[in-house]
Amino acid sequence: MPEHTPSDRLALDAMLGKLATYLRMCGYDTAYALDRDAEADDDLLDIAEREDRLVITRDSDLATRAPESVLLSEREIEDQLRELADAGFRLSLAPEPDYCGVCNSPVEEVDPVEPTPEYAPSAGDERVWRCTDCGQHFWKGSHWASVEATLEDV
């Protein structure tokens, strides 16, 4: 794996959807190919160049074509996270979410008096964030704890 300084702005290929969610939860601005209709390598490379993003991929041809890239060899999320940690990436949960785990747009905290969807807890009972684009709601529940445990094992 080449030496590099990890960027906070990443572009992940179509094989790395689960990793994109983890990286977003760690505070990385993470463009995921399938979220951006960029399944073709050329489309992802265009996004990476236009938005100054580091490409992370399991495709050696794509890694070679990108000006800056990290080539992962592993398939399992825990192993991919270890590869990134070894490459110098900070892999711990952000104190609070910055990016939507679904679409990567910014999130904002929901006012405690605002209603939340049925699937989310009341913002009056615990802190809840909402995506400014897709409207998805997030809170530090069991999924947060599961991701945190996975990252601690890395």
Image (tube, rainbow, N blue to C red):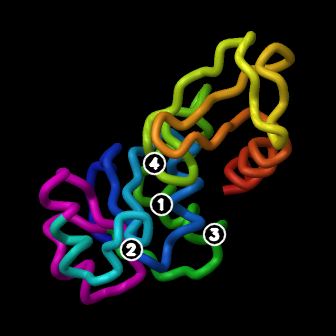
Disc 4 marks which amino acid? Answer: Asn
Q: Distance between the residues labelled 1 and 4?
A: 19 Å
- Could you classify mark 1 by the number of other residues whose Cα lies within 10 Å: few (under 14), some (14-19), or many (20 or more)? many
Q: In this view, does 89 lie to the left or right of 6?
A: right
Quadrant of the frame with the C terminus? bottom right
Mark whose residue sits in front, 1 or 2: 2
The dot on residue 84 is: 1
The dot on residue 67 is: none
Of the two numbered discs 1 and 4 on the same chain, state the one appearing first in sequence.
Answer: 1
Of the two numbered discs 4 and 2 on the same chain, state the one appearing first in sequence.
Answer: 2
Q: Give the range drawn in magenta.
A: 47-69
Q: Where is residue 80 in the image (x, y as percent from the top left)?
A: 55, 69
Q: Name the residue beneath numbered marker 4.
A: 104
Q: Position of residue 70 (x, y in %)?
A: 33, 68
Q: Is residue 73 left or right of residue 139?
A: left
Q: Distance between the residues labelled 2 and 3?
A: 14 Å
- Could you classify mark 4 by the number of other residues whose Cα lies within 10 Å: few (under 14), some (14-19), or many (20 or more)? many
Q: Give the residue drawn at x 84%, y 30%.
A: 121
Residue in the foreground of this view, choosing between 36 and 83: 36
Q: Give the residue drawn at x 53%, y 69%.
A: 17
Q: Name the residue beneath numbered marker 3.
A: 77
Q: Distance between the residues labelled 1 and 2?
A: 15 Å
Q: Circle 2 — which element?
A: loop
Q: Do the residues labelled 3 and 4 touch (CB within 8 Å)?
A: no
Q: Do the residues labelled 4 and 2 touch (CB within 8 Å)?
A: no
Mark whose residue sits in front, 4 or 2: 4
Mark whose residue sits in front, 1 or 4: 4
Of the two numbered discs 3 and 1 on the same chain, state the one appearing first in sequence.
Answer: 3
Q: Name the residue beneath numbered marker 2.
A: 13
Of the two numbered discs 1 and 2 on the same chain, state the one appearing first in sequence.
Answer: 2
Of the two numbered discs 3 and 4 on the same chain, state the one appearing first in sequence.
Answer: 3
